[in-house]
Image: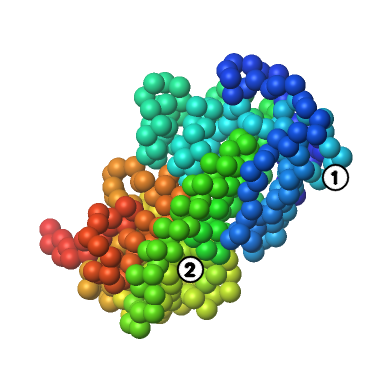
Amino acid sequence: MLTLVAALGAGCAFDRGWSSGPAETASAFEPGRDYFPTPVVFRHSNQLTVTYHGFYKRARLVTNGIGEEFRYVFVQRGAPLPELHPDEIVIHVPLRRFSLGSFRYGGISDALGVTDRLVGFSNHSNATTPAIVGLFKRGVLQPNFNLEGVAHRETEAHFNWYATTTLADTGDAFARMGSLIIPAAEHMEPTPLARAEWLKFFAMFFNEEARANEVFDTIERRYEEVRQAVAGVQVRPRVFLNLPQGDAWNIYGGRNQLARIIADAGGDYVWADDPSEESGTTVHYELALDRGLDADVWLLGADGTFGARLANLSLGNPRFAAFKSVRTGRVFVNHKNYPDGPNPWWDYALIKPDEELADLIEIFHPGRLPPRESTFWRRLDTSLERPAEP
């Protein structure tokens, strides 16, 4: 468990008595009332579980691969604290102020109607959610995110991308200012629907379970409808992923949600035999080249788009130029506005897996779906010739 958990301690909730709007007004506690009549159930996530108890709810997160455990008790504002276990973290709900270090939660915030409580966003240049872009334009959110600014805005919870080093680096600072870092580990889920189901977890912080259930049910139905377009396909392209980092290659485990969406789209992921559910596994550079050389399709994830353009990499590295996918022009990046604009994948892919699935089906099996404009993925031009020598 991270240092911040010990610093907060059981029952050490961050209720400072603010009152600056209807969303922050707590009515008198009514014993016996069920404050959460529409609970969420995690049908797909294998990291999250939840139970409801009238005026409080308990959630448990155990991260895949690493096995780090977080236990939360969400208590309705104004209600007494239930009996607590020593390692449980108390959160008074609904939250009144929150910040996002993982901008993948921007679309969720908008879908649940809680962006009016957002007081910090990690990188304004990545925002594509209209409601959040509007907050920046009106000066409600500051473009340069920092701890001091968030502390001044008195955030109650900060949702950050899950990596133990990332959380540990800032956890103590947030704990000292009476806030809490919530690990966003949806990228380690085994399926796209399990990843999308994190909107239910996010909703628990705002008592928006009813809306989350409605949104997720629609996502689930649409995903299955799209998936049927390639159900039973016999010819499946081999799919390679990502770019190298130094002498290693970052891959997604064969049981990760990205591996699953490739399979659902009718592709064969070259690392499908890897047993991990993690999204940051590394393999030796030479081994990756061997698997990528004859792959039919090369997909560059959002992380890869922050590096050099693939065309330049392929020209500068004969090994990349020899890739079948480069020679046939079947290299794609999940950045609709690549390379200079904001990337809608960060904000919306989590709650639009059906649209990402449709993008991939069009890449793997053109013509299986009605004509549509791609939502996230786009083809990269790999036909450029080597610049002439001066």
138 on left or right of 201: left
Q: Residue at x 43, y 44 (%)?
A: 347
Figure quadrant of residue 224 = bottom left
262 on left or right of 17: left
Residue 381, visible in the rendered structure:
yes
Residue 103, visible in the rendered structure:
no
Q: Residue at x 45, y 58 (%)?
A: 221
Amino acid carrying label 1: it is His
Q: Decide which of tag 2 and tag 1 comes sooner along the chain.
A: 1
Q: Residue at x 12, y 58 (%)?
A: 390
Query: In terms of secondary structure, where does tag 1 sit?
Result: loop
x, y (%) of residue 354?
A: 40, 58
x, y (%) of residue 124?
A: 41, 34
Q: How is the protein colored in the picture?
A: rainbow
Q: Is residue 301 above or below residue 140?
A: below
* Residue sitting nearer the eye, 291 or 92: 92
Amino acid carrying label 2: it is Arg
Query: In terms of secondary structure, where does tag 2 sit?
Result: helix
x, y (%) of residue 262?
A: 42, 69
Q: Residue furthest top?
A: 20
Figure quadrant of residue 95 = top right
Q: Is residue 214 above or below residue 292?
A: above
Residue that numbered label 1 is attached to: 85
For label 1, the crowd category at 10 Å Cα-Cα, with few meaning under 14, some 14 to 19 and many 20 or more, is few
Residue that numbered label 2 is attached to: 260
Q: Residue furthest bottom?
A: 234
Q: Residue at x 28, y 76 (%)?
A: 324
9 on left or right of 145: right
126 on left or right of 92: left
* Residue sitting nearer the eye, 273 or 41: 41
